[in-house]
Image: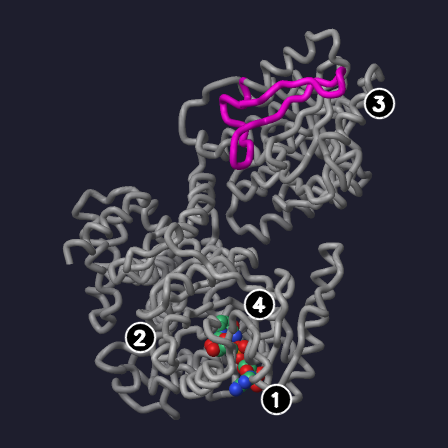
Amino acid sequence: MAQYTRASGFVGLITLQNPPVNALSAVVRQAIVDTVKIALSDPKVKSVVICGQNGNFCGGADIKEFGGEMTGPPLIPMIHAIEAANKPMVAAIEGNALGGGLELALGCHYRIAHSKARLGLPEVTLGLLPAAGGSQRLPRLIGVPDALDLITTGRIVTAAEALRLGIVDQVTEHNTVDAAVKFALSVAGQPLDARRISTFPCPRPPDSDALFEEAMRKVRGSARGAMAPVACVQAVRAAATLPYERGMEREKELMATLFTSGQARALQYVFFAQRAVGRWSMPSGAGWDTSKPRPVNKAAVIGLGTMGRGITVALAQTGLSVVAIETQEKQLMEAKQAVTSMLERGAKRRGAAPALDRISYSRNIQAVADVDLVIEAVFEDMALKLEVFRQLSAFCKPGTLLCTNTSALDVDELARGTPNPELVVGMHFFAPAHVMKLLEVVYGKRSSPQAVATAMQLGKKMGKASVAVGNCRGFVGNRMLRLYVEQAFFLLEEGATPELVDGALEEFGFPMGVFRMSDLSGLDVGWRTRKAAGQAQPGEASGQSARIRNGSRYSPIGDLVCEQGRFGQKTGRGWYQYDKPGSRVARSDPWLHSFLEQYRARHGLVARSIDRQEVLERCLYALVNEGFRILEDGIAAGPEDIDVIYVFGYGWPGHRGGPMFYASTVGLPKVLERLEHYHQAHPDVPDLQPCGLLRRLVASGSPPVHRWREVIKKLHSQL
Ligand code: NAI
């Protein structure tokens, strides 16, 4: 609802009240309509201030209402009535003014923001566009280039940037409502014609056609196949080229297409999935609602390689004191420089001071003595990690949480090597750790709920999508990825090329296909793991046995490419060729194609024609199948956990909602049928055998994805 009071005698004060974010639900919209009417009809009221309770202006539309029948007054006429008012309407923006919240503020004649406020139109991230006039008013207010940037990316800006862009008229450090009331009194009685944004001509840069073409090219390139960013460009173009009313009609048409699209449903699912993963639980029943995190003010990072550097930056930017430890002098010096420049770049972007003095560097592990939490990021070597954990147990104060950033090693084995296994959890970051939004928090058999709660809370503070998962080889993300990559290798053996496989996956929406990605991250990484696991063997054994490991099909293609010193971009050669080592533009490599032909000839494999559909089915359904196994094993609590991991850590296109959501949209019976088909065709690949949980879900009528948790719970209780 909205409360109506009078401030300073002459100002009508409307306070939105709908915790937690004052979303514009039907009741709130009705209350705004009613209170605006009261304020405008009261002759004593000279001007009006709209604010939100509890220091938060308005988080936008109530997403929960999206699925159902529209009730209550619609937003567009409500905002029009505010703009058309004959008394100054002032938005007092504290906290967030997002989506419909900012559109409401744009309907006001003036906007006063607190210095800590955040403003933006993030609709595109939900597969939509700002359709309550936002796409038409913002370009008229701040010009086409900046409006395109904000609307097509959903980027949220600080009050300082909003002032610079001209979105707000004033920024205050003090009480925003008081400042807005004072301001409202100062403009009472002044003419309002020049304040109604919908009447502004849209400033049109001379080269606007080229600008829109460039914007379209950019969104098509970055959000492969996503409809909303394209519609956002079209809506802004309408603002620039059409009168306001016609622009509003276009905004409505474009929104109607998006609103009913599967993409918006998928992105909204991801939005709610992010919330769902915050309500984590462990098999013991302990979870987010019963476990209290411990305070963490000071942390240590051990090992300042690729990951340790990013983790140090992420921790310092979150406001923690960090002790950064590295044994190698040269590495330490390089890390110091790299961390400093990452912090400086980040601070410049945010317009803040870099948090350099929060970090102290040391070569001595004893510097961990007073930290609350340690994140270990040394080489992926169990013996080394066990030794580091033994030292940490000796030097840390009692109760210090010991976290490992291992990609796949056994968290229980590490915990067993310490006197307090309950303090050990995995905190699996993704590279670059200060940028990537995903964190897998891995609980072992003995991890205490408090340790998990602390890691989850720290992840949240760092702005990560944090997902609690059980302990198994590769956890959730890497365990599923292995099967996806393996299918891509098999497809090469059967006749595909890296270009075909990558093309299909990129068309599906991944920013990079398997092989381009492998060239970027380095082929040697996987090779080292396969050698350590005894899979990759030097030289190529002849005959069938070269392609079999432990009774299952194995492709040594990746190992053979590595034996040629082709590690990807860093060596200028991998699955593709590059102009020089370190260059990023991949070109087809005839050497690789003839290598594949010779390989097939040696193994008596006859290349067949493979289409993009098969590439997608083989790679994606193998991955999805492993996702079902992970659910069956209780490693992830629900499909939302897997989907958040894939969208935020593995480049799965958000508009397809994550692998498990995608499987539900394809239809579980179809996924099952295709897996059965491919398993029959490739009986030497046991991983293609459909998982029992998938069969059960199909047998129980393929319930929608939000009901899988129930089915899984029932399944586990029967075991
Ligand atoms: P890296 O090789 O870049 O860095 C490891 C660093 O640890 C080196 O600087 C080394 O000198 C240092 N180190 C070794 N022993 C040490 C000790 N006893 N005390 C202090 N420092 C020591 O390795 P990277 O890539 O950063 O990986 C670290 C860990 O993170 C591994 O467990 C890896 O599996 C995991 N990981 C790696 C990801 C990646 O994309 N690189 C992603 C997620 C996890």
Please, what secondary structure does the residue beneath circle 3 have?
helix
The first of marks 4 and 3 along the sequence is 3
Q: Between marks 1 and 2, how big is the CA–CA gap?
A: 50 Å
Residue at mark 2: 606
Q: Position of residue 509 (x, y in %)?
A: 48, 54
Of marks 1 and 4, the one in the foreground? 1
- Give amino acid for label 2: Val
Q: Is residue 518 something that shows in the picture?
A: no
The first of marks 1 and 4 along the sequence is 1
The image quarter containing residue 369 is: bottom right
Please, what secondary structure does the residue beneath circle 2 have?
loop
- Give amino acid for label 1: Gln
Residue at mark 1: 328
Q: Between marks 1 and 4, how big is the CA–CA gap?
A: 21 Å
Is 716 displayed left or right of 203 in the figure? Answer: left
Nearest the camera: 666 or 594?
666
At x 50%, y 67%, the residue is 429
Residue at mark 3: 186
**Residue farthest left in this picture:** 718
Give the class, few, some or many, for how many residues have Cα within 10 Å of label 1's Cα (few <14, many ≥20). few
- Give amino acid for label 4: Pro
Residue at mark 4: 432
Nearest the camera: 228 or 15?
15
Q: Between marks 4 and 3, how big is the CA–CA gap?
A: 50 Å
Q: Which region of the structure is painted magenta?
A: 1-30
- Give amino acid for label 3: Ser
Of marks 1 and 2, the one in the foreground? 1
Please, what secondary structure does the residue beneath circle 1 have?
loop
